[in-house]
């Protein structure tokens, strides 16, 4: 069982192991390589087979939990000691501190809106963008120009909401924890962080930036925190069933082939430190 | 949703946008993103449509009042756009219409036929700002099934 740690608490060896595994997955030429994850996120931007699996729906959280687990398992194929780290943006709020250090995720884009200039993912020779809505072949960031980082108070507010989600089970849901966390309702713990980093993170192909997985690991950690106080059982997910065009608790999450219910209790697979 | 766009909504009166609301919001609208010419468009040009140069890039926008299948081109390349529905507030039953794109995926821009009638142009300009010296690729016009 793995333990997902705060990125700010990783040792030098843990950081280098994670970067090496990510780069090995990127260099893989067949199967589920890194670009496969980018493409899947793009394909599940909107409706697939009548369902919004990944975004603006109750399955936003379980879909991304499985998405992260698939990537983490792929990284473990290169180094079994690697676990996904999380970026706690309520505590680490600098463009130059963890995780944006030169030995880990690297820093901002040049001129505030260009290619990343430091760290292991700087420049197309080190990290080539192959699948994207925009033409740059090197990773771009435009940090702190749009969006903002949520505060601990924002997080506490979302955690205090007892209902997981409500009808119409979409971006239009005017209550529930999920839409407040995802971004249809304030305070928006998810989308505004994508915008704060900018560059590729603001786009449909946001997994091109490896910090995507650290951000979503934190989102998953917060859901786990909510579950710790509310319950990991299927009764704490909504809808429970028989809602057309919405992924119910017993429906399968495409393209992973696992049900929502199988993702709910992660404690036998990984925990958060 | 950003604080700025939410302020826009309240300032301009979001109730007016309900005329373009769809039954399934994002589900209905996004399912059609990227389709070109798949449905008949109004013969009359929408007064909100635009075609101009912004920061050296030609931006063109065509609204689809009936189906929400708005079209935006930047330097002749098609941008995937989806219309979404968002709550006005947790205490209101009303929603408002906004647009997102494959480039500003997480920043809905309010859109309507009154105070936010320039929403699609605002979205196009945000995308140009994000692009900088880049252009859109074929993947910017992402198809959904």
Image (cartoon, rainbow, N blue to C red):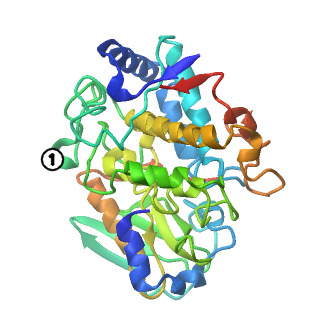
**Residue, x 30% and y 30% (percent of image)?**
A105
In this image, A149 relative to A190: left or right?
Answer: left
Taking depth in this image into account, of A166 and B114 the one nearest to the observer is A166
Q: Residue furthest right?
A: A242
- What residue appears at the point 39 percent right and 38 percent down from the top-left corner? A88
Residue B42 position in % (x across, y down): 57, 83
Vertical relation: A193 (above or below) A14 = below
Q: Seen from this angle, which residue lies furthest left?
A: A111
Q: Position of residue A258 (x, y in %)?
A: 72, 33
Q: Left of A103 or right of it: where is A184?
A: right
Report the side of A10 relative to A131 (left or right): left
Residue B16, above or below B85: below
| Quarter of the picture holding the N terminus of chain B | bottom left
Residue underneath mark 1: A111
Quadrant location of residue A146? bottom left
Q: Position of residue B139 (x, y in %)?
A: 46, 48
What residue do we see at 39% from left, 48% from top? A152
């Amino acid at each position: 069982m793995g333990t997902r740690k705060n990125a700010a608490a990783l040792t030098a060896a843990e950081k280098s192991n994670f970067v090496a595994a990510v780069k090995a997955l990127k260099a893989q030429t067949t199967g589920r390589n890194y670009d496969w994850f980018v493409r899947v996120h793009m394909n599940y931007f909107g409706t697939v087979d009548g369902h919004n699996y990944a975004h603006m729906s109750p399955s936003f959280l379980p879909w991304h939990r499985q998405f992260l687990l698939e990537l983490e398992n792929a990284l473990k194929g290169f180094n079994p000691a690697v676990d996904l780290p999380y970026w706690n943006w309520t505590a680490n709020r600098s463009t130059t501190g963890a995780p944006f250090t030169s030995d880990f995720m690297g820093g901002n884009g040049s001129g505030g809106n260009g290619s990343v200039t430091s760290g292991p993912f700087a420049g197309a020779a080190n990290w080539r963008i192959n699948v994207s809505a925009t033409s740059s072949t090197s990773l771009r960031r435009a940090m702190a120009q749009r969006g903002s980082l949520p505060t601990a108070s924002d997080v506490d507010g979302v955690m205090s909401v007892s209902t997981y989600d409500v009808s119409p089970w979409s971006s239009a849901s005017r209550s529930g924890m999920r839409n407040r966390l995802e971004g249809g309702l304030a305070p928006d713990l998810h989308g505004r962080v994508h915008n704060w980093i900018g560059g590729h993170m603001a786009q449909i192909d946001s997994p091109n930036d490896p910090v995507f997985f650290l951000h979503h690991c934190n989102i998953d950690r917060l859901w786990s925190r909510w579950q710790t106080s509310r319950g990991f059982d299927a009764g704490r997910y909504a809808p429970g069933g028989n809602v057309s065009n919405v992924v119910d608790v017993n429906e399968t999450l495409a393209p992973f082939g696992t049900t929502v219910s199988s993702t709910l209790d992660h404690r036998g697979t990984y925990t958060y430190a | 949703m950003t604080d700025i766009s939410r302020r826009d909504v309240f300032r301009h009166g979001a109730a007016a946008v309900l005329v373009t609301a769809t039954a399934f919001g994002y589900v209905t609208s996004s399912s059609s993103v990227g389709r070109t010419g798949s449905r008949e468009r109004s013969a009359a040009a929408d007064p909100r449509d635009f075609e101009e140069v912004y920061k050296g890039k030609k931006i063109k926008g065509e609204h689809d009042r009936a189906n929400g299948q708005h079209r935006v081109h930047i330097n002749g390349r098609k941008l995937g756009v989806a219309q979404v529905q968002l709550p006005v507030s947790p205490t209101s039953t009303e929603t408002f219409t906004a647009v997102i794109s494959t480039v500003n995926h997480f920043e809905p821009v309010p859109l309507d036929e009154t105070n936010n009638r320039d929403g699609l142009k605002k979205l196009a300009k945000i995308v140009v700002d994000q692009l900088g010296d880049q252009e859109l690729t074929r993947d910017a016009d992402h198809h959904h099934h």
